[in-house]
Image (cartoon, rainbow, N blue to C red):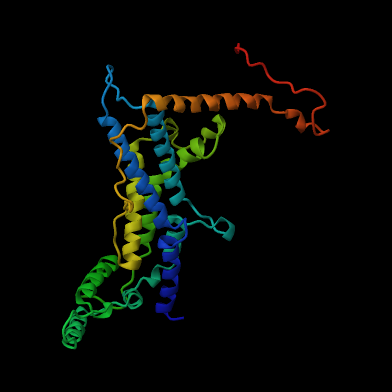
Amino acid sequence: MSSIEDYRAKRAEWLEMLDGEDQHSISKQIYGIMWDSAVSRALSQAIELAPRDSDGSPKVSFALADALHRWHASKQLLAIRKITEGYQGGEKRAVFSFDPLLKDMVGHAHLFTRENMLAVEGVNGDPQAAAKTAAHTAQQVVGGAAYIPDNADPILSRDRNAFIDRLTQSTEGTRSDSDVADSLVFENLQAKLVGASSRIKEHVDKLIAHAATPRSRTYVSDQSVLDGLTYREIWDAERNVCEAYLFLILLLKNASSGIVPEFDFGDQLEYLDQAWITNADLKEVRATWQGLEAETRTWIDWDWTTLLPQGGSSGSSVTASTGPST
């Protein structure tokens, strides 16, 4: 294949990973991260604005506030760990994350030439020639608006060439089809993501995803991650993964968009100013909590004798004492 066709094929692979329809594509991960971030920020602000009791604490159910805090922190940390997950190779361990994507781009950085990018995107490499084509197209139209294709759009040609100038460290006066991106662009982006997520990775691996033993936790290079992470660290990591995504979308698709998903079914904060339930309904909610407690107490009586070699109990079940512990 020609260099242009090589780039076209790799670009299709990269876009599938970055912005494809699969549930794990990087774009879907990004939108999930940012939706959860927006929801958490909005609800946390609502808690801050809630009426206060005599001690100055917001009149918000502890169960609700605690669930929001722990849900957001653990879910965002896992999401960042997932989207920056390292990849060592092998089809069985293949993942959609920035690491394998950027490693592949490092290995194929020579394909990011001005000629290849403009040809595959259908953009005219000469803004002046594009302007002449656009003018000629407009002259052929009698009434109505003229449709200007990408290869005849002088503004698109100008802006895309300017982007490639920055990417390849060239200038308008020195442009050539052979201008090419340096692999350090992708290596540096990878290093930026590692720097933003390394503490999160260790925290998740030792405290969230795995029940690490005290001994195994001593091998963590930065012991401070075991004391907890700040929301600032989480937000910085979110910003870094979003910046990486936005750059790569601009690089491969010459596209840009918002990264906080829009809610298509009305106002996502509708009814937030309403009380959830009445005092009468609270009795049912409390009964649900108590019902769970009662159900779990019955688990004490499970027939563990089914684990025996004969496969079952020959007599009545034996349970532990439910009296006060000593």
Relative to 256, say whether 233 is above or below.
Answer: above
| x and y percentages locating residue 279 in the rendered image | 37, 24
Q: How many marks?
A: 0
Relative to 185, say whether 43 is above or below.
Answer: above
Residue 153 shown left or right of residue 65 in the figure: left
| x and y percentages locating residue 300 in the rendered image | 65, 24
| x and y percentages locating residue 320 in the rendered image | 68, 19
Please identify the quadrant where the C terminus is shown.
Answer: top right
Q: Nearer the viewer, residue 92 or 68?
A: 68
Q: Nearer the viewer, residue 43 or 70?
A: 43
Residue 316 shown left or right of residue 232 in the figure: right
Residue 114 shown left or right of residue 202 in the figure: left
Q: Nearer the viewer, residue 125 or 21?
A: 21
Q: Nearer the viewer, residue 126 or 208?
A: 208
| x and y percentages locating residue 324 in the rendered image | 60, 12
In this view, the residue farthest toward the bottom is 140
Q: Residue at x 45, y 67 (%)?
A: 13
Q: Residue at x 30, y 67 (%)?
A: 254
Quarter-of-image position of residue 257: bottom left
Quarter-of-image position of residue 214: top right
Relative to 141, say whether 238 is above or below.
Answer: above
One can see residue 84 in this view: no
Q: Residue at x 76, y 32 (%)?
A: 306
One can see residue 61 in this view: yes
